[in-house]
Amino acid sequence: MKRKKMTKINKTKRSKQFFNLVTYSEKKPNIEREENEKKEKIKHEDIYYFSKSSYRNTYKKYSSDKFFKRRTSKRGELDREERLKIALQKAQKEFTNKDHKVTKKEHTKKKTTFFKNINEINQETLYLQTGAFALFDTLIRSGIHSVFGYPGGAILPIYDELFFWEEKKFIKHYLVRHEQAATHAADGFSRSSGQVGVCFATSGPGATNLVTGIATASLDSIPMIVITGQVGTQFLGTDAFQEIDIYGITLSLVKHSYVVLESRFLSQILAEAIYVAQNGRPGPVLIDIPKNVGLEKIKRFTPCYGTTVHKVLGWRYKVKNQLDNIRMALHRLSVSSKPLLYIGGGVISSKATRELSELIYRYKIPVTTTLTGKGAFDEDNRLCLGMLGMHGTVAANFSISNCDLLIAIGARFDDRVTGKLQDFACKAFIIHIDVDEAEIGKNKNVGIGIVGDIKKILQKFLVLMERPEHKWLEKPLREEFQNWYEQTAEWKHDFPLLAVPGDYSPLPQTIDDVLLPQTVIKTITEIKPYAIITTDVGQHQMWAAQYTKCKRRKWLSSAGLGTMGFGLPAAIGAAIAYPKEDIICITGDSSFQMNLQELGTISKYNLRIKIIIINNHWQGMVRQWQETFYESRYSHSNMSEGAPKFDILAKAYGIRSLYTERQSEIWRTLRDALEGLDPVLLECNVLEDENCYPMVEPSKSNSEMSLSRELSTTPEGLVINKEKERVELSLEEDK
Amino acid sequence: MERTISVLVEKDPGGLVRIISLLTRRRFHIKSITLSPCERKGYERIIIVVINQSDGVDAGKQLTKQIRKLINVVNVQDITYLPLIERELVLIKLKVNLIERTEILNLAQIFRFKITDVTDSTLILEVTADPGKIAALEKVLEKYNILQLVRTGRIALIRESRVSTSSLKEYPEFEVLTGQNYLNNIEDLFKKDY
């Protein structure tokens, strides 16, 4: 039926066929969470341990037989609303038949001839769509409406096709100033919205510029599609102009990668790539498209959907029933007296924050989060201990080394978190929940490993807790954990995060009214508590992680790879995903200079990004390490020579700029900077030799932190003065 | 300690590269790796032999988990402790004089290898055997002048007869039960007191 229609239209006017796609300007379908799920009624056989939410995979969206009967073709091109719309239109047409004529149904079925005469086949209607058409068709059918990229020789066929699609308002392309920024922007888009980010680049130099961005996404498990151009298939392997084996280069960085050699496979491969990038443990997927594939015509193009991919690949993401493990974990929890939750980025990427907070509130278990997991649990809550690890809070690190049950959810026991691996949670029994089977027992041996989608498993936990055999435990366990909570609260009270030790005022007094970096970050969150915050890497990142309070998916920071220059492009991605929200990019002077060409992108699209440069004229973290571990030999870490004047730079790009260096002025200038819809650059000249504390030195246990230049803690929970001890030791030696 | 891992992958130009890149970047020590087409069309089977270092980490277990994550991999199995048939083909080119030649012809009867090529001064031996036998033969041939030596790498299949020859050596009273899954029989080994 469909095809007949198509051919009819084709005969009448030979233009591009866009089937029944939705433009991005129209309302996107509101996909609400199913809150009122009846948890008790779920059968064990029916549970899949991958997410069924329509963002993540398309299984539920298209398995329509549960909800309504199919009306269109079996591939399910239309949403339910649209189908109803069509039905209404049909009904209206029948009623508005003004001529009162009886419409006759055409009963004459056309006789289908299976073998046509070769001369009758119209070649032009057979070969209508090109490879590039298939690419954009699949992208839009998968709900992707914004793309980042930079054109070049080998990807020109795709950009040529993009011209038509942009004209029809199906997709919008954002031109960046450097390919690295394209990947970071796609990364930021995906981090903030939870959908796949897509970026384009050309072959050769364009492709190699992407490598850093792909590695960043891969280490933080961010779903992303990277599409690179390549020289034509006839030149492959001949060292042609701008030819680079990007497939080989990125082999160890990506989740999966494809080289498309025939255009008819393109739509299937792209749909599969989007499916692979989002399901299981998310990750970047690379697709390499040679130049002639984009131009090649496809014989009888049929669009491809996620449903077909699910039939092929869905078995990969089914996990065994973990009920026994969950029961064992619950038993462990009921036996323990000092439990602690250790939350990683997995909770955010599987959208399980609601289930998590339910779990926490039920038994009142204290929580620490990693850098990527920041915002997964309400940070103003009294149970939240803040970040743990190298620059984590004292309370979190003490409770890690004193707890007797550690429940790690979606975390991967990174070396910045664990410190000395033998001493990490050495008194505790460890339960590890993760999607990735290989992460369990990779660094630290665990007691119970539960594999599966975190959302599903936490739901299972909650269902089991509701049952009578566990329900009676709630009250006695709460009382049991009360002492433990009080102890963590005591640590929280004894060791607060303060810029100047002992000064509890919001604006600590400093010599000459010099600005402290911590106060800048503190005032940002006070003024805009609901803003999306992106950071670069360095001291300011750690301060921002310590002092800001974020909501989920509002903290974008490169954690695993630590890419300097990540903040500004990621802010662009977030601004495109959420054009109506405040986006604040906290960055350092040297990190900012790594990707400062992106000011051009910001001023072109007039994005609502507030850039706050914390300028201390040093590569702060490098300087701190040189000071503590290399006896203050500052080798190439000073950035004061050759630094640009940021206000003039911003003016050159047409961006409003502000400057401050006084502690007393900070509130006023920040308020001026953060209000309004236009992009702003604020330079804060801060105290130069300020260090980021508390700090756990590498290969030391988490409870041995240095609190300031002199003070440090011992594993027993005591505070000692290092300087005095050193002096005493030297005196003893003299004797 | 060696671990034998059998992997079924889809046929794909990048299939082997993906696995080898994983092995190198995760610092596994490979002893041998063989890839060849298998009983299913469009699929290939890879047999990897890894050396398990004695630093407490179970390389075999970690490697199976890591390989299972790859998209082009269909099935992974650590088959080290299952009843196996392991074989390897070795071709050896020897430089021999007349006396040595007779010695090696005698050896051929003992070790059951073939002599495929003969010239005045050289011989080519074709040996198909399990790893133990090959190790023994290598030791015997040490004193001869070996010009070239090629090995195919180890290939392995699980025995459907459910009998492991090594277990037969250790437990001579072990009953051969036909018509049951071999895994059940292995459990019997632990349950019964031999």
Image: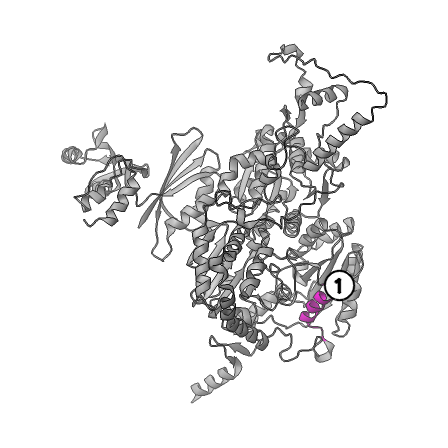
The quadrant in which the C terminus of chain A is found is: bottom left
| Image quadrant assignment for residue A489 | bottom right
- Callout 1: SS: strand
The residue carrying mark 1 is A682
Residue A8: percent from left, percent from top: 73, 20
Work out whether residue A142 or residue A533 is closer to the camera in this orientation and state it: A142
Chain at numbered mark 1 = A
Q: Tell me the magenta residue range.
A: A514-528
Quarter of the image holding residue B93? top left
The residue type indicated by label 1 comes to: Leu
Residue B28 x %, y %: 40, 49
Outermost residue toward the right?
A: A99
Residue A3 image point, x, y percent: 67, 22
Image quadrant for the N terminus of chain A? top right
Residue B138 to residue A264: above or below: below
Residue located at (64% from left, 77% from top): A500
